[in-house]
Amino acid sequence: MKLAELTIGQEATISSLKQLDGSTRKKLMVMGILPNTPVTLVRKAPMGDPLQVRVRDVSVAIRKSTAEQISVEVA
């Protein structure tokens, strides 16, 4: 499943960032978005882009196109 497919309030664990290009992956990892990290979808903008996610008690806005490249596992 992809991060962009989560419903609001749904929790998952990041499983892979391998589909992202190197610079984007590095930026996300600096913000705490790492494999095996729990993530919660907080809200989606009215047009569906960007998405607000909570990672390690920090809210981060991510473009939908980027979230579609992040693999997650729902518990």
Image (cartoon, grey):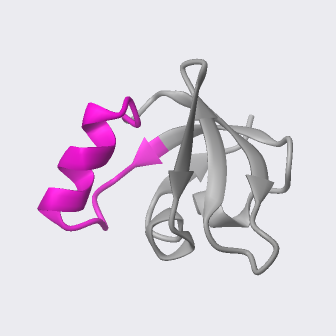
Q: Which residue is at the far bottom?
A: 47
Residue 49 located left or right of residue 26 = right
Q: Can residue 1 be seen in this view?
A: no
On whether residue 23 falls in the magenta region, the answer is yes
Quadrant assignment for the N terminus:
bottom right
Residue at (38, 29) in percent of width and height: 32
Q: Residue at x 36, y 34 (%)?
A: 34
The answer to whether residue 25 is visible is: yes
**View extreme (left): residue:** 22
Count up the numbered dots: 0
> Left or right: 31 with respect to 69?
left
Q: Where is residue 54 in the image (x, y as percent from the top left)?
A: 63, 33
Splitting the image into 4 quarters, where does residue 2 fall? bottom right
In the picture, measured across the screen, residue 7 lies left or right of residue 18, that is right
Which residue is at the front of the view, 16 or 31? Answer: 31
**Measured from the top left, where is residue 28 in percent x and y?**
32, 45
Camera-side residue of 52 and 75: 52
**Residue 66 quadrant:** bottom left
Specify start and end residues of the magenta stretch as a single range.
15-34
Q: Where is residue 68 in the image (x, y as percent from the top left)?
A: 53, 71
The magenta stretch spans residue 33: yes
Question: Split into 4 quadrants, where in the image is the C terminus?
Answer: top right
Q: Is residue 8 above or below residue 63?
A: above
Residue 28 relative to residue 54: left or right: left
Task: Give x and y (percent) for residue 16.
Answer: 39, 49
The residue depicted at 64 percent of the width and 73 percent of the height is 49
